[in-house]
Image: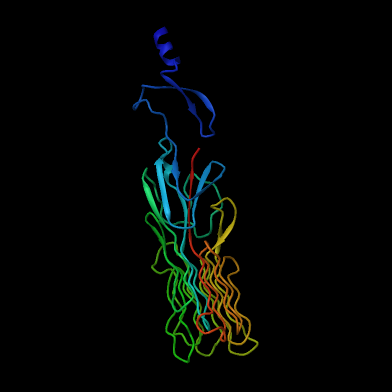
């Protein structure tokens, strides 16, 4: 018994066990069990790293690598990470509808505690000790049918927001582009862009608005939680449609709005407002350019007015973002 006691208490055969709070509470016998190794916790690098309670949060505002060097062996369910994947919002041109928001996809893992968006419920991801390339979609540029780009983490892809066509010169402009959320239409377009394209569950976005050829003001682009809103007629008392609402999540530790649609550009009055919850740009007045979507939120750009400079007066879509959260202690 003395020999065994000596073996158990010698520094050569023992080490302090660390709790998830980082405090020692006893000894672990080395050389017993599976190779004598203690529990391993989640360790990873990549992006900008912050903490919230027992969680680490990796925020990618551009391309990078989420490199996992160790996973949680004590609680395997903790390896089911939380994530938010937002694509780039659609860009716009004058006399046009608002850009659609980038696709919104979120999942809260079982180990994390925070307030999720109503759109939580994307597929679960159980990570391994390996590297995961991250793609962050750019916002669509000013111009004709310039949708946002996709964002990707592991098996999850969010689609870029739709973009409206240039609507000038008396020539029918065709349909706006589909996307995570669709772009709004105008009197010369043939409809509005569809949202949730390609389709996923829960839906990653909504369609833009379209009224018809008698309504000259631009219509709003779709947002994560609401379709774009319709504009009025051509009179000075009418207005353009606002962008569809985005949504809030607290995955970063506090409420942040993402994926709002852009407001429509005006024919003879004020432009449509950006999304009421989200980061879509406001539509321009009859002679002004639309506002760009907010960067790293996937907001759609606001459409520009009827007399904005040529076809260069549109707005750019907001770039996307990828956020990964897990328990590390």
Q: Quadrant of residue 193?
A: bottom left
Q: Is residue 39 above or below residue 124?
A: above
The quadrant of the rendering that contains the N terminus is: top left
Residue 10: % across, % down: 44, 15
The reply, left or right, for residue 313 in relation to residue 152 is right
Say how the picture is coloured. Answer: rainbow
Quadrant of res 147 = bottom left
Position in image of residue 268 (x %, y %): 61, 87
Residue 299 point in image, percent of width and height: 53, 67
Residue furthest top in the image: 2
Residue at far left of view: 35
Examine the rendered structure and indicate whether residue 193 appears above or below residue 88.
below
Q: Is residue 55 left or right of residue 35?
A: right
Give the camera-side residue of 115 and 130: 130
Q: Residue furthest bottom?
A: 170
What residue is rendered at 53% in x and 84% in y?
95
- For the question of whether residue 43 can be seen, the reply is yes
When the figure is inspected, residue 236 is found, relative to residue 230, above or below; the finding is: below
Residue 1: tell me if it is visible: no
Q: Nearer the viewer, residue 19 or 307?
A: 307
Residue 64 image offset from top left, x and y in percent: 42, 53
Report the label total.
0
Taking 126 as reference, is 99 left or right?
A: right
């Amino acid at each position: 018994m003395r020999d065994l006691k000596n073996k158990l208490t010698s520094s050569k055969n023992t080490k302090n066990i660390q709790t998830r709070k980082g405090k020692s509470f006893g000894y672990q016998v080395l050389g017993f069990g599976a190779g004598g190794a203690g529990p391993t916790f989640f360790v990873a690098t990549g992006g900008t790293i912050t903490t919230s309670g027992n969680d680490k949060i990796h925020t990618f505002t551009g391309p990078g690598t989420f490199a996992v060097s160790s996973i949680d062996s004590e609680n395997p369910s903790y390896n089911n990470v939380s994530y938010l994947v937002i694509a780039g919002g659609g860009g716009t041109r004058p006399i046009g509808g608002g850009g659609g928001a980038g696709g919104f996809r979120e999942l809260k893992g079982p180990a994390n505690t925070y307030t999720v968006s109503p759109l939580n419920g994307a597929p679960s991801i159980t990570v391994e000790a390996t590297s995961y390339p991250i793609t962050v979609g750019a916002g669509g540029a000013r111009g004709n049918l310039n949708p946002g780009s996709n964002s990707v983490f592991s098996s999850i892809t969010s689609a870029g927001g739709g973009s409206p066509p240039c609507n000038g010169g008396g020539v029918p402009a065709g349909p706006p582009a589909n996307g995570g959320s669709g772009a709004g239409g105008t009197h010369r377009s043939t409809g509005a862009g569809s949202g949730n394209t390609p389709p996923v569950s829960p839906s990653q976005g909504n369609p833009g608005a379209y009224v018809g050829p008698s309504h000259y003001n631009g219509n709003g682009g779709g947002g994560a939680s609401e379709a774009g809103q319709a504009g009025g007629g051509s009179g000075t008392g009418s207005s353009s449609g606002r962008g569809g609402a985005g949504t809030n999540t607290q995955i970063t530790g506090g409420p942040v709005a993402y994926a709002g649609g852009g407001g429509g550009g005006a024919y003879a009055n004020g432009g449509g407002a950006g999304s009421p919850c989200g980061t879509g740009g406001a539509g321009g007045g009859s002679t002004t350019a639309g506002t760009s979507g907010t960067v790293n939120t996937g907001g759609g750009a606001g459409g520009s007015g009827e007399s904005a400079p040529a076809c260069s007066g549109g707005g750019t879509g907001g770039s996307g973002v990828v956020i990964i959260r897990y328990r590390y202690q």
